[in-house]
Image (spheres, helix red, strand yellow):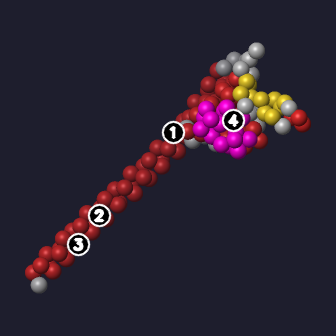
């Protein structure tokens, strides 16, 4: 029998709230089976666990949940993986470009902050020297 997981199992393993896991389910990233009275209990398979792991990895890379779902869904099909890999490269390149742009903006802002600190120290030093002369 394949391994199965409860929502609590996955929440604990991945340090998530059960609410977050239900949200991923609502987004179509996870498709647990239902059991118990009225189908209240979610039963997650190894496939769901892997999809959750890939979703969290995609989030760390800065992908939207829609992008993550599109990519993960591509891997569900047993077809040739070349299109999936090419699409993944495109998405990664777009996100790398976005991150590099953000990094350039941050470096420019940091340089500006450093210049203001230098100017302020100089003004403070001059004010301190004037105060000691008077």
Tell me the tag on residue 96: 1
Report how far apart the C-alphas of labels 2 and 4 lie in the structure.
50 Å
For label 3, the residue is 123
Quarter the C terminus occupies: bottom left
Return the x and y of residue 69 as percentages of the image width and height. Answer: 70, 35
Q: Is residue 8 magenta?
A: yes
Q: Mark 3 or mark 4, which is nearer to you?
A: 4
Residue 6 falls in image quadrant: top right
Q: Mark 1 or mark 2, which is nearer to you?
A: 2
**Dominant secondary-structure state across the stretch colored magenta:** helix
For label 4, the residue is 8
Question: Is label 2 in a helix, a strand or a loop?
Answer: helix
Question: Is label 3 in a helix, a strand or a loop?
Answer: helix
Q: Mark 1 or mark 4, which is nearer to you?
A: 4
Return the x and y of residue 29 as percentages of the image width and height. Answer: 72, 35
Residue drawn at the location 55% of the way across and 38% of the way down: 61
Residue 112 falls in image quadrant: bottom left
Report how far apart the C-alphas of labels 3 and 4 lie in the structure.
58 Å
Q: Mark 1 or mark 3, which is nearer to you?
A: 3
Judge left or right: residue 67 versus residue 134. right
Going from the N terminus, do you reach mark 3 or mark 2 first? 2
The answer to whether residue 90 of the structure is visible from this angle is no
For label 2, the residue is 117
């Amino acid at each position: 029998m394949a391994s199965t997981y409860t929502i609590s199992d996955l929440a604990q393993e991945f340090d998530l709230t059960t609410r977050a896991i239900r949200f991923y389910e609502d987004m179509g990233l996870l498709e647990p089976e239902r059991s118990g009275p009225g189908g209240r209990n979610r039963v997650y398979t190894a496939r769901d666990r892997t999809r959750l792991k890939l979703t969290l990895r995609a989030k760390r890379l800065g992908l939207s949940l829609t992008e993550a779902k599109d990519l993960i869904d591509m891997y569900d099909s047993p077809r040739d993986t070349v299109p999936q890999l090419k699409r993944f490269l495109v998405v990664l390149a777009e996100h790398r470009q976005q991150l590099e742009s953000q990094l350039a903006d941050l470096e420019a802002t940091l340089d500006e902050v450093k210049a203001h600190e230098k100017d302020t120290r100089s003004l403070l030093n001059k004010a301190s020297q004037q105060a000691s002369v008077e």
